[in-house]
């Protein structure tokens, strides 16, 4: 059905406990705060706090991710939030319903927003990856042949070139038809907070001796690293949220670089702990990421938009999982 704000579709939660009128518009879906309370089954104060923090922490910009809409039986317009905000809040409250809603919303958006465009999905799936690979390979050869990039830049091109091969996998992921890589590995060893602190201290001492670090290097801010390591071992309904070495390693690298748990040295410590975790889980030798590649990857994560988090995580995991062809 349609109203003055655009199209409305009905979303029913698993088990049929809740029905939500979801607004479609501006190439996304929109829910009010009250609807998120119903969706995530959390108190209004909890949802309100998380929405404020999404904007306050700079994860998303309020002006482009919130809009006012008039609703029935109300004289005042209500604030509605788009799918990016909904996903962020769902992640923060660790709601399985949030995952179910994202899958549903992605499907609905494709059905509604791609309709009317002459897009050959089969050709895109079959040829899009090869075309993209050729374009990226040409770019890499051109830049390297003319010596237009540094060693780190060449490594970054290698990362992007390798990632282009996983483009078809990402397409299937977005269409909810992607199988998990068969060569993902179950985690065998977590990083112990106490031993990790000693390892970082040893790294700091080595860098200080070489004049490559300051006294601020590795100084943890309010047990932030402890929180990150704890998050990696979270469980939901008796199952680990991050169920493989690749997934844990990717989140470890991303969180340390982006959340700045240390006063100084977050990129170097993030890369160090990433390698340490892979080593303790017997995956370091087959990871396929060389020194320059790791530097380039850390820089890419540091410069990435927070809204690209899922993309960065998939990039790291695909690199760790090996060749995606």
Image (tube, helix red, strand yellow):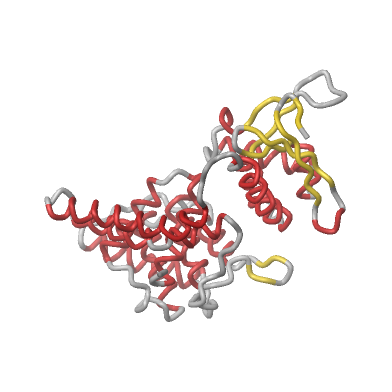
Residue 311, position in %: x, y?
Answer: 48, 53
Identify the image quadrant of the N terminus. Answer: top right
**Vertical relation: 271 (above or below) 285:** above
Instruction: Report the front residue among 41 and 288.
Output: 288
Identify the image quadrant of the C terminus. Answer: bottom left
**Vertical relation: 58 (above or below) 75:** below
Residue at x-position 84% and y-position 46%: 19
Q: Tell me where residue 284 sits by quadrant.
A: bottom left
Q: Tell me where residue 270 sits by quadrant.
A: bottom left
Residue at x-position 45% and y-position 50%: 258
Q: Tell me where residue 45 sits by quadrant.
A: top right
Instruction: Report the front residue among 210 and 18.
Output: 18
Residue 183, position in %: x, y?
Answer: 48, 77
* Side (left or right) of 209 relative to 272: left
List the single residue furthest toward the top.
75
* Side (left or right) of 243 relative to 214: right
**Vertical relation: 184 (above or below) 122:** below
């Amino acid at each position: 059905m349609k109203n003055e704000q655009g199209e409305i579709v009905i979303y029913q939660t698993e088990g049929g406990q809740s029905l939500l009128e979801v607004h479609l518009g501006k190439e996304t879906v929109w829910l009010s705060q009250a609807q998120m309370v119903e969706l995530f089954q959390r108190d209004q104060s909890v949802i309100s706090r998380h929405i404020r923090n999404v904007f306050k922490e700079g994860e998303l910009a309020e002006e482009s991710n919130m809009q006012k809409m008039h609703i029935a039986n109300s004289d005042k317009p209500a604030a509605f939030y788009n799918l990016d905000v909904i996903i962020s809040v769902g992640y923060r409250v660790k709601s399985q319903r949030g995952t179910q809603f994202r899958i549903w919303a992605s499907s609905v958006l494709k059905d509604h927003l791609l309709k009317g465009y002459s897009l050959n999905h089969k050709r895109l799936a079959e040829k899009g990856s090869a075309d993209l690979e050729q374009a990226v390979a040409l770019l890499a050869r051109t830049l390297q042949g003319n010596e237009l990039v540094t060693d780190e830049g060449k490594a970054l091109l290698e990362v992007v070139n390798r990632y282009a091969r996983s483009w078809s996998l990402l397409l299937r992921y977005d269409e909810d038809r992607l199988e998990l890589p068969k060569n993902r590995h179950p985690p065998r060893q977590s990083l112990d907070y106490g031993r990790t602190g000693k390892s970082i201290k040893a790294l700091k001492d080595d860098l200080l001796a070489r004049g490559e670090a300051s006294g601020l290097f590795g100084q943890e801010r309010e047990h932030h690293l402890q929180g990150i390591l704890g998050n990696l071992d979270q469980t939901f309904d008796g199952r680990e949220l991050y169920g493989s070495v690749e997934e844990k390693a990717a989140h470890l690298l991303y969180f340390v670089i982006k959340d700045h748990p240390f006063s100084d040295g977050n990129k170097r410590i993030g890369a160090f702990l990433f390698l340490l975790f892979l080593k303790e889980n017997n995956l370091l030798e087959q990871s396929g990421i060389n020194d320059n590649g790791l530097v380039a990857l850390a820089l890419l994560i540091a410069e990435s938009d927070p809204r690209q988090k899922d993309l960065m995580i998939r990039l790291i995991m695909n690199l760790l999982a090996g060749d995606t062809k």
